[in-house]
Image: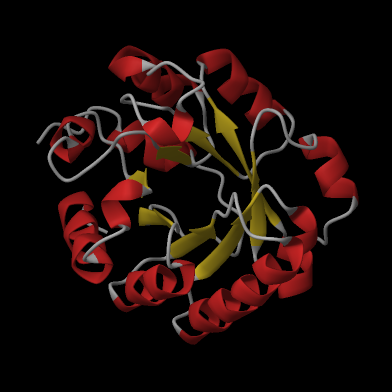
């Protein structure tokens, strides 16, 4: 395998004290969120993101509380997608914001020191902007076409390579990734992989496989 970005990336990373990078499989829950979170942690996931587009705020908090308990047991980081209030109320380690969510600057004003804030980006310009404004890590994608990011065209490998060359904070590749195409990302030294659909079944075993392939 080729690792022509690995040395540069590892030497330049700026990682929050409560983040360990590389962290390999970045598990985003869907469907049975609690089951996926539990199996992900059992499989060795260092980060679990709770992503819920349909539940009420009350139900989201109940689910988040349960996932928080699971991640604490396994010493894994817990990130909530979009909802800062749910993240804070459940005692999550951080929140992940999209381009259309509250700004990173405003999020910093209402979150405690050490709170992790990740940002979804879809271009080199957005990635550089997120880094400049203080994001702790970024998601970059969608690498491949995916129904979970239907409003965005796939960015392709050229953009992923550009971002890896120019951004110094941890990067998580996302979008249409599965065990069949993961090797293409390993070839460009991607160390952190987010999946949604691919982790819906056999979560525990897939997390172990991804972490093994990424050597984390």
Q: Tell me: 128 left or right of 168.
A: right
Q: Quadrant of residue 182?
A: top left
The residue lying at 47 percent from left, 62 percent from top is: 48
Q: Height in image: 93 above or below 133?
A: below
Q: Is residue 91 visible?
A: no
The residue lying at 32 percent from left, 13 percent from top is: 158
Q: Position of residue 47 (x, y in %)?
A: 46, 62
Front residue of 201 and 132: 201
Q: Position of residue 210 (x, y in %)?
A: 22, 55
- In this figure, what is the number of numbered marks? 0
Q: Tell me: 209 left or right of 90.
A: left
Q: Is residue 109 visible?
A: yes
Q: Position of residue 196 (x, y in %)?
A: 38, 48
Q: Quadrant of the N terminus?
A: top left
| Residue sitting farthest toward the bottom | 73
Q: Quadrant of residue 201?
A: bottom left
Q: Quadrant of the C terminus?
A: bottom left
Q: Height in image: 53 above or below 44?
A: above
The residue lying at 35 percent from left, 30 percent from top is: 146
The residue lying at 24 percent from left, 58 percent from top is: 211
């Amino acid at each position: 395998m080729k690792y022509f970005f690995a040395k540069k990336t590892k030497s330049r990373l700026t990682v929050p004290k409560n983040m360990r990078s590389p962290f390999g499989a970045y598990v985003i829950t869907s469907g049975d969120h609690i089951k996926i979170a539990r199996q992900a942690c059992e499989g060795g996931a260092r980060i679990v993101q709770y992503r819920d587009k349909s539940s009420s705020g009350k139900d989201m908090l109940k689910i988040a509380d349960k996932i928080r308990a699971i991640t604490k047991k396994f010493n894994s980081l817990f990130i909530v997608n979009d909802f800062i209030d749910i993240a804070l109320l459940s005692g999550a380690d951080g929140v992940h914001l999209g381009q259309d969510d509250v700004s990173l600057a405003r999020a910093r004003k209402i979150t405690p020191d050490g709170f992790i804030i990740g940002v979804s980006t879809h271009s080199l310009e957005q990635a550089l902007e997120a880094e400049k404004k203080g994001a702790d890590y970024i998601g970059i994608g969608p690498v491949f076409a995916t129904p979970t990011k239907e409003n965005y065209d796939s960015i392709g490998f050229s953009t992923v390579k550009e971002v890896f060359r120019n951004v110094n904070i941890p990067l998580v590749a996302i979008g249409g990734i599965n065990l069949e195409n993961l090797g293409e990302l390993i070839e460009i030294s991607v160390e952190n992989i987010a999946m949604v659909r691919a982790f819906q079944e056999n979560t525990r075993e897939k997390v172990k496989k991804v972490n093994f392939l990424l050597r984390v």
